[in-house]
Image (cartoon, rainbow, N blue to C red):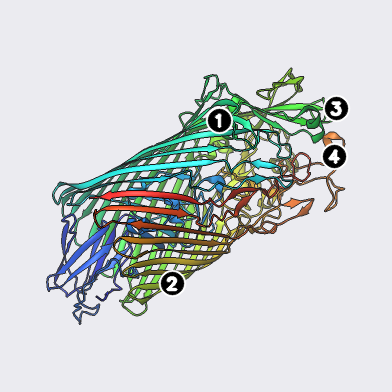
Amino acid sequence: MAACFSSGVYAQSNTTGAITGHAAAGDTVTLVNPATGFTRTIGVSSDGSYRFSALPTGQYTVTSSSGGSRTVNVSVGTASSADFVSSSGATTLDAVLVTGQGFVNPIDVSSVESTTILTAEQIAKVPVPRDTTSVALLAPGTVRGDAAFGNLASFGGASVAENQYFINGFNVTNSFRGLNFSQVPFEAVAEQQVKTGGYGAEFGRSLGGVVNQITKRGTNEFHAGFNIFWSPEDLNEPSKNQYLTDGTLLHDNSRDSTWDSTASVWASGALIQDKLFAYGLISYTKKETDNWGGPVGNAAANILPTAANSSSSTETPSWLLKMDWYLTDSNLLELTAFSDSQDQEIDVYSNTLGETNRTDYRGTNYIEQGGDNAVLKYTGFWTDTFTFSALYGHGEFSRGQHLRTADGELVSYSGDLNQQVGGCPDIQDARTATRKGLTGVYQSSCSIGFGNQLQRSDSKDTRDQFRIDAEWQLGDHLLRAGFDLDDYESVAGQIREGGRLWRYSTVDPTPINPNSGDEIDIVREQITRSGAELKVKQRAFYIEDSWNITNNLLAYVGLRWDSFENLNGDGQSYVKIDNQFGPRLGMSWDVNGDSSFKVFANAGRYALPLTPSVALRGASASFFTRQNYTFTGVDPVTGAPTGLTPRNAAGPAFINGEDGNSHNPDTIASKNLEPQYQDEYILGMQAALTDHMTLGARGIYRDLKQAIDDNCDYTAITDYADENGLTVNIPNPGFPYCRMFNPGQDAVLVTDIEGNGELTTITVPGDRLSPPAKRTYTALEFFVDGSWDKLFLQGSYTFAKSKGNTEGGVKSDIGQADTNVTQDFDYIELTENTYGYLPNDRRHSLKLFGNYDFSEQWSMGANLLVQSGRPKNCIGVLDRDPNRAPGDGPSLPVALGGTYNPHPYQAAFFRCNNIPVPRGTAGRLPWTTTLDLNVAWRPSFAEGLQFKMDVFNVFDTQEVTSVNEIAEDGSTGLPQANYLVPTSYQAPRTFRFMVQYDF
């Protein structure tokens, strides 16, 4: 059979597809979905074109009243074609269009987007982990983000916090920091669409990419089934150990073990024939992990023979219900409800480093994640040319945590800033090596929480989204418009386990400042508490026109308007940005007029709102205090000091104005704050070599034009005061050091300069605060898509450069997940030498994946990734000693009578040994090669039964994927023993087995 294509098609929405084509003018064309009985009949326009819009994904039969039939598959966001005459109306086409196995997906000449669509059938044939991110990473232009942020992808050089995720049209992005998202049980995914660039005005709030999933649905036929996946620990290879540069064991990974299992059962069918359909799935995942971890203590150069280890159990009882009610052939009502709630229990023990013993039970860490979601959508085919849809969704995502100590004490935090919590405090020993040698390293042997931070027990995010979309076919124009209302609320807060951090240090006996110690060793108490209910109100409107200028040339013009308003814990607005315009332009040229060769281009502006997390400490009431003490002893279990005497009788110092009182919302952000946005340009082509293979290429350029971050250098304000003859009383209680601004732009700040409660508006020149934020991404992508009777193959090669002075929302260099408030622009000194190749820069990426059917019973799949390593950095101190020459080693700190005078941020600068080391110039990590394979058996004696085995990382290549880039100790300026020590490797070889039965 020959495939027949048409150029008269247009772009689609994020949940449906379309069928377009040509027939004799005046005829009628009827569409039928054999699986559901859904039927529509429309008339052919005077120019011989027709269009069925807003179609649920699936297979359809299209029939013309003049005779002829076409069978067409519809995928999300694309338009499939079925012609009964040529576009000129002169010739009858007798070939039947059938899409399926053996034929490659037709080139979508209606689209100017860069999109990859994978169906459930394709995903099942490829050895890929069963999660959203792993499937997204099959698309060109995507790379895995830093392990510090979990299992997330970077799209087109953007940070992992700049993506958007949708399920059946509902936004499931966890917007608190942009570092998580809700998920349906993986077995319920029918299609996953990955937009890596050039997406239309319907999509926004993303500088990275968009992941759009469509779930399975019921049909007239009853179907049911179950499967079990499991990964046994006995067959899996251990991870590599981590060692310091002197060979000392840092993390004992070789003894770690993990096993997991997922069981799912599903059923679907018609509750009312041709009218009401349901698909339901229940899934249960259990994962258990033994992690033997590493040393207890803070200074990597002072390893003790004791360590912490943990045994964790994670349970995920998830479910999904999808219902479709065809009220009439012109009105469809859809319900999607699902849950991804997850509970994790982590038992923490002490052990001897290098031995699999467990000496003392410390306690248990309880973590909640995920929640329930419900989406209701109406679609009305009101006329042959006008379609309307409305969607309402409500989603919840828990982030709660609590602890239970070894003696049974329940430790939880309610968000009350006056609350005290139990447990063991956080201990840091930053004294000199000499002092540690005399007394031993001070440490805690009873801590339970990760990083000693305890999240608020009722932490939760809630989204309420309402959107309407309309589509009108008007001759050669397809007009689409929509409005989106998105209200997001975060209940958040955290405190340190034990309520405080004790930081030991060594100082000169001579008093240095009013809040410093007067003994050789002192200890600093640091208390941080936060808790607030934060809100972000987001609104968007878009309009777009896909104009068929000729039969072969399509022009796309779109405009998106965004606004967002961020509210603090008192419900006060501290940032509000309206009129955030995002124009989108594109063209698609069907060169041969038969969808066999397409040239496309687009240009667009994409914007990103502020995350709610910014306000937790930056704009809401919080505590951050420090006070120095002398001490007479140290508790051998908790590591806390005893016999305390405060150095400052006036009490603790409040940092960043965090004294427990609400901030004035006018003082949080620059009054001329402008949107953060990025411009993108793409030029590409795609050609069908045969009915079975297409090849394509595209060039991509992204340019971050403006960012929003925080600046914490209040000396810029004091300089202004001095220059204008104002009395300076900075910092004063309630005075925030850190304020939101546009890097490189003048900042209009409202502040209490004199400490008398009166606010003054000042303008600080941009070049006094920081240079402009810069980030560019330049890439050339080549991609292939092939499908034969027994083989399907997809792949890509990407040559890319990601360069700038900021990664974006997060900071992989140090694993900082404080979205929109990284340390990048806190001080102007921090911006020196920062321009260079960024952490998500992977110069070369080769991806190939597919499956081959040896017979009806046996098949084999493969997934290959070959990728160059990320750049490395040398991050050290900024010594303000005027007499220290480049290359000179540091002297004693000023506190000990020397001249070493580090910047307050200590080891945070792109320089080592007092020599500038520009970003990305300290070498690169090695190339990584990962080959995954699977084999499946479908026995002929039992139809619907299938066995499958996947092997991930067949050759067990565990190359380094990230390292510690901090080269110098902030307190002393001396080299650190853990510089360039690996922090993550490729995942080791693992096996996964599956048994599935469908009926």
Give the image location of residue 441, x and y in percent. 73, 30
Could you tell me which quadrant the N terminus lies in?
Answer: bottom left
Q: Mark 2 points at which residue?
A: 696
Could you tell me how far apart the alpha carbons at marks 1 and 4 are, in whole angstroms?
39 Å
On the picture, is 878 further left or further right than 712? right
Three-letter amino acid code at the position of disc 4: Leu
| Mark with earlier residue (3, 4) | 3
Q: Which mark is residue 509?
A: 3
- For badge 2, the amino acid type reads Gly
Whether residue 5 is visible to the viewer of this picture, yes or no, is yes
Question: Residue 408's x, y, as percent?
Answer: 52, 19
Which mark's residue is nearer the viewer, 2 or 3?
A: 2
Q: Nearer the viewer, residue 688 or 392?
A: 688
The reply to whether discs 2 and 3 touch (Cβ–Cβ < 8 Å) is no
Please tell me which residue lies in front, 718 or 893: 893
Q: Sort mark 1 into few (<14), some (14-19) or many (20+) by Cα contacts within 10 Å.
A: many
Above-or-below relation of 239 to 495: below
Q: Earlier in the sequence, mark 1 or mark 2?
A: 1
How many numbered marks appear? Answer: 4
Count neighbours of disc 2 (C-alpha within 10 A) and say few if under 14, some if 14 to 19, many if 20 or more. Answer: some
Structural crowding at the residue carrying mark 4, measured as other residues with C-alpha within 10 Å and reported as few (<14), some (14–19) or many (≥20) = some
Q: Distance between the residues labelled 2 and 3?
A: 71 Å
Considering depth in this image, is 592 or 990 the residue closer to the camera? 990
